[in-house]
Amino acid sequence: MTAEDVTACYVYGVVPDDRTDDAVIEDLRPVGNPEARVGFVRHGGLAALVSEVPTGKAIGTPEDLRSHAQVLDAMAAAESPVLPFRFGTVLRDTDSVVEELLTEGREDFSLALERLENKAQFTLRAQYVQDAVLREVLEEHEEVRRLREELADVPEPAGYEQRVRLGELIVNAIEAKRQTDFQEVEQRLEPLAHAMISAEPAAAEGLVTASFLLEHGQLEAFEEAVEELAEQWRERVELRLLGPMAPYDFVSDALSADKEAAATAGEGGG
């Protein structure tokens, strides 16, 4: 028997036992082993999403990352609450899944899933159209226009300090726009969601990446608000709404909120 013949149990996440529809996941490619099948390990009202993975084969390819997300997002799209685990969670076998995860974590997982009931994550990615936002900066800032015109015919080495100054002015102007536009996103969309988490944009042209935890009944109004924002910012900001997906960005909140509630209840009982 080779190392690749020995398998372990890859764990995608946890769902309520009564929301396990095999049809949702039966055709999905599992992580690390195309010949395996994604299934459920059930115990104590919970079910772990799992598949076999060879212990002698490294995982972590882009396809593996996509497979991990596709399994979890399929459950979210089926309107099941799902508690996603980090990519790469592997246990020895299904008995370990029962003993080390579903038994030991039963109370925390059950409470977190109750908190995530009827909810899914949607992520908004907003990015400036570079030419459009630069035109706005030139129209709105006289010093930027003046420096740009002065440097138009100046050899690059000769105008170094002015070019540095021009770059700083443009960066600062775009940052001011980013803060104003982010406030617009927040004011328009956060009231329509159960929760919102935002991240700093990774690229210079990024406006914001924001994740929203939406109840299923909130989706229509939320999508309409995004469409209105896209129309308002047409040709200056590109908006992309992704989802439904598993609540990756809200797992910590769901778990910690339940622990805080339990601690508060314990203090009250004392």
Image (cartoon, rainbow, N blue to C red):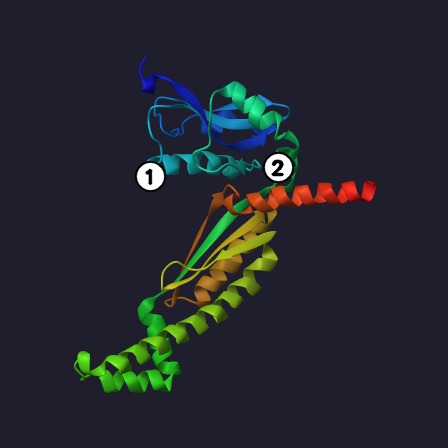
Left or right of 147 in this view: 212: right
Image quadrant in which the C terminus is located = top right
Q: Name the residue carrying label 2.
A: 113
Residue drawn where x is 35% and y is 76% of the image: 168
Residue 173 in the image: above or below residue 27: below
Q: State the image quarter where residue 222 is shown.
A: bottom right
Q: Name the residue carrying label 1.
A: 62
Residue 112 in the image: above or below residue 235: above
Q: Residue furthest top?
A: 1
Image quadrant in which the N terminus is located = top left
Secondary structure of the residue carrying numbered label 2: helix
Q: Residue furthest right?
A: 270
Left or right of 198 in this view: 52: left
Residue drawn where x is 57% and y is 49% of the image: 214
User: Are there few (<14), some (14-19), or many (20+) residues within 10 Å of tag 2?
Assistant: many
CA distance separating discs 2 and 1: 28 Å
Image x and y of residue 79, in percent = 55, 38
Residue 84 in the image: above or below residue 227: above
Closer to the camera, 96 or 175?
Answer: 96
2 or 1: tag closer to the N-terminus = 1
Image x and y of residue 119, in percent = 58, 43
Residue drawn where x is 57% and y is 65% of the image: 187
Amino acid type indicated by mark 1 = Pro
Q: State the image quarter where residue 126 is shown.
A: bottom left
User: Are there few (<14), some (14-19), or many (20+) residues within 10 Å of tag 1?
Assistant: few
Q: Is residue 171 visible?
A: yes
Q: State the image quarter where residue 175 is shown.
A: bottom left
Q: Is residue 17 visible?
A: no
Image x and y of residue 220, in percent = 55, 51
